[in-house]
Image: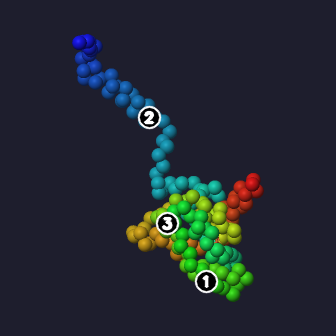
């Protein structure tokens, strides 16, 4: 039977002193490095047109909703987060949503709904904050989803620019 000969530890090693000093020196070095921690929410994340935040429904300057209730975004949504019931309208577009809900707890901010929409009616906003006191409150209905198209314009321009590549 082979006998394993272990190295004799010094008193310092028995007291874990090398490891303690290595750890302390590392902590000391980190104290003088530039801090990378963000003090959220006092320091919010920077956002721009590339930010893929929560989806929102675009509303034209005359107050009409762009959505024609075609259901493509609902079909494209991998998280089954969108529920749409359409209704007829006298407007030129003929159909608009009677009900348009997005369950924000399900939404994974993938942007598939934006890509699927033939009317540029649903766009990824720069809104990232999501907090409430109940699950029901985080199912956004059409009124909570509506945003003026002017507010979503930077995102819309970005989407057009990206689509030009194809
Ligand atoms: S961003 Fe993705 S998960 Fe969220 S509603 Fe659109 S398709 Fe569904
Ligand atoms: S948001 Fe776009 S894809 Fe979704 S139902 Fe309305 S028009 Fe169709």
Rendered location of residue 80, percent (x, y): 52, 66
Q: Secondary structure at mark 2?
A: helix
Which picture quadrant has residue 161? bottom right
Residue 7 appears left or right of 25: left
Q: How is the image coloured?
A: rainbow
Instruction: Identify residue for label 3.
Output: 104
Rendered location of residue 19, percent (x, y): 33, 25
- Mark pair 2, 3: CA separation: 39 Å
- Give yes or no for contact between labels 2 and 1 (Cβ–Cβ under 8 Å): no
Please name whichever residue, 78 or 99, is drawn nearer the observer in this view of the structure.
Answer: 78
Rendered location of residue 82, percent (x, y): 54, 69
- Mark pair 2, 1: CA separation: 61 Å
Instruction: Identify residue for label 2.
Output: 30
Say if 30 sits above or below 51 in the image.
Answer: above
Q: Earlier in the sequence, mark 3 or mark 1?
A: 1
Say if 88 sits above or below 109 in the image.
Answer: below
User: Residue 87 bears which disc, if any?
Assistant: 1
Say if 4 sits above or below 117 in the image.
Answer: above
């Amino acid at each position: 039977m082979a006998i394993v000969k272990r190295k004799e530890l010094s008193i310092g090693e028995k007291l874990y002193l090398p490891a303690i000093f290595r750890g302390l020196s590392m902590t000391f070095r980190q104290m003088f490095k530039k801090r990378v921690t963000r003090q959220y929410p006092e320091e919010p994340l920077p956002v721009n047109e590339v930010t893929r935040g929560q989806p929102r429904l675009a509303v034209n300057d005359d107050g009409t909703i762009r959505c024609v209730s075609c259901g493509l975004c609902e079909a494209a949504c991998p998280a089954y987060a969108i529920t749409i019931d359409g209704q007829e309208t006298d407007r030129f577009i003929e159909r608009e949503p009677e009900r348009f809900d997005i369950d924000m707890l399900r939404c994974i901010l993938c942007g598939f709904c934006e890509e699927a929409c033939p009317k540029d009616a649903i766009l990824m906003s720069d809104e990232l904050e999501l907090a409430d006191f109940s699950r029901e409150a985080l199912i956004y209905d059409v009124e909570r989803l509506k945003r003026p198209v002017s507010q979503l314009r930077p995102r819309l321009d970005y989407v057009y620019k990206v689509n030009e590549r194809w």
